Amino acid sequence: SLTHGQRLPGDLIHACHAAGVAIEDIGLFAVAAGPGSFTGLRIGIATMQGLAMARAGRIVPVSTLEAIAVAAPPGPARIAAWMDAQRGEVFGQVFEREDGQARPVTDAIAALPAAVLQHHREWVRGSVFEGDGAIRYAADIRDGLGDQARVAAAVPHLAHAIARIAASAPDRAVLPHAVVPIYVRKPDAEIARDRRAGA
């Protein structure tokens, strides 16, 4: 079977064909810049960089957590975006939504669900928790917030939200080489190296 990196260029061409759009017609690119899987981020960003360089275009890097907040169904203004960060952790950030935009009101962190709740304690009450991390750790959210816990029933689709964010904020576009991944936490190799150094 093909790897994600091998499938992605063909998948993009297929998506453009299905939408009736040629790569040559695209004037602005967008990419999920993270947080997320280190390998997945590198593959996605490198692919968009290659396309944008070939077209002398620019790229809008979009936070995956911001995309979760924008993709959430209409409703409460405050969204706690949680992504499954693996190893029992979540990437979490709280946003205020208005007019289809999402403004961060906290920093993004990676930690155990209870620690993220504690870190964002002033902002999570009254929030709707969205994203695969919220669904996976719904019990932790309910343990921490009790009756005030509101967790989405489904994971939002992010591609459309990322495109909407880019289209509404073309001033955020950068040259391809200037796209910087949003990692939030250190790569596993660095964590292992730090553990060895500490030991």
Image: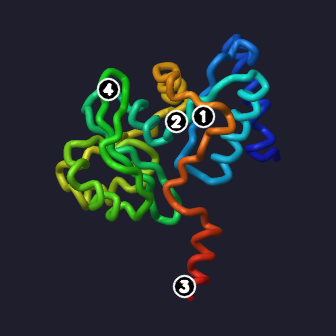
Quarter the C terminus occupies: bottom right
Q: Is residue 5 left or right of residue 126?
A: right
Kind of residue at disc 3 = Gly
Q: Residue at x 76, y 43 (%)?
A: 5
Which three-letter amino acid code belongs to the residue tagged 2?
Val
Q: Is residue 43 visible?
A: yes
Q: Amino acid at mark 4?
A: Pro
For the residues marked 1 and 3, what is the alpha-carbon distance in whole angstroms?
Answer: 36 Å
- Mark 4 or mark 2: name the one nearer the start of the chain: 2
The residue under label 3 is: 198
Q: Crowdedness of circle 4 by 10 Å Cα count: few (<14), some, many (20+)?
A: few
Q: Give the distance between the C-alpha atoms of the residues marked 3 and 2, in whole angstroms.
A: 35 Å
Q: CA distance from mark 3 to mark 4?
A: 47 Å
Task: Name the spot of residue 64 as percent of width and height, x first.
Answer: 50, 41
For the residues labelled 2 and 1, say whether their Cβ atoms are less than 8 Å apart. yes
Q: Amino acid at mark 1?
A: Val
Marked residue nearer the N-terminal end (3 or 2): 2
- Residue 171 numbered mark, or none: none
Percent position of residue 32, x then y: 57, 38
| Circle 1 SS class | strand
Q: Which mark is residue 62?
A: 2
Using the rendered view, name the quadrant where residue 79 is placed: top left
